[in-house]
Image: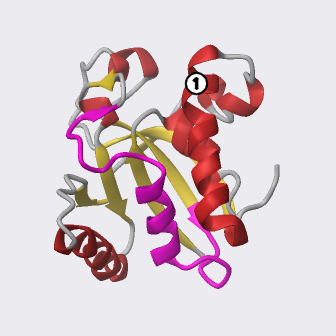
Amino acid sequence: MQTIILGGGCFWCTESVFSHVKGVQSVTSGYAGGDSVTANYRAVCGGDTEHIEVIKVEFDDSVIPLDIVLDIFFATHDPTTPNRQGNDVGRQYASVIFYTDATQKPTIARAIGEFRDSGIAVVTEVHPAREFFMAEDYNQDYYANNPEQSYCNFVIPPKLAKLKQYFAGFMVEN
């Protein structure tokens, strides 16, 4: 089992993607990367903490290796826009990877390097994991629990379509 923390915009969106991936044991929405000793949805969305909306992904690397986890991450968000995903603007929506084990760092560097070598200006930040603050209960499994929410219905289906198009072999239906 491995754990990695990923920020690719709104955590409702990234959580929805990774909850459909084979070998993923759990996906937890939360906050990471800020200097504040606490984090909550209101403070993070208000830009008061410098935290980023992230998901903590626990996965079985014998089912889905880290390089595929990263491929899915990069394919389902825009890693070229600093502190922004679509209409979501602010530090809390940064593209970021927090590695939980130093052995993950070369795989992450290789993935980002491949993009940059092909001319794609990836701005994804890479940091060792620091404190992770679990998001409030109502933010967990948000899309699954709120399927009629208009923001989610606009943003998440295209991400799931990319998952299905490019990674169907790694996809499970929930």
**In the picture provided, is 98 more to the left or to the right than 136?**
left
> Which residue occupies the foreground of this view, 84 or 98?
84
Q: Position of residue 54 (x, y in %)?
A: 43, 43
Mark 1 lies on a secondary structure that is: helix
Magenta stretch?
58-85
Q: Position of residue 7 (x, y in %)?
A: 39, 46
Task: State the colouring used for the structure image.
Answer: secondary structure
Dot 1: within a 10 Å radius of its alpha carbon, few (fewer than 14), some, or many (20 or more) residues? few
Mark 1, residue position: 154
Which residue of the protein is positioned furthest toward the right in this rendering? 174
> Which residue occupies the foreground of this view, 21 or 105?
21
Q: Position of residue 89 (x, y in %)?
A: 28, 24
Q: Amino acid at mark 1?
A: Phe
Magenta stretch: residue 67 in it? yes
Location of the N terminus by quadrant is bottom right
The residue at the point 33 percent across, 57 percent down is 97
Residue 72 to residue 47: above or below: below
The residue at the point 38 percent across, 28 percent down is 39
Magenta stretch: residue 6 in it? no
**In the picture provided, is 106 more to the left or to the right than 14?**
left
The residue at the point 24 percent across, 60 percent down is 126
Q: Position of residue 48 (x, y in %)?
A: 24, 19
Can residue 57 be seen by looking at this rendering?
yes
Residue 173 to residue 68: above or below: above
* Residue 165 position by quadrant: bottom right
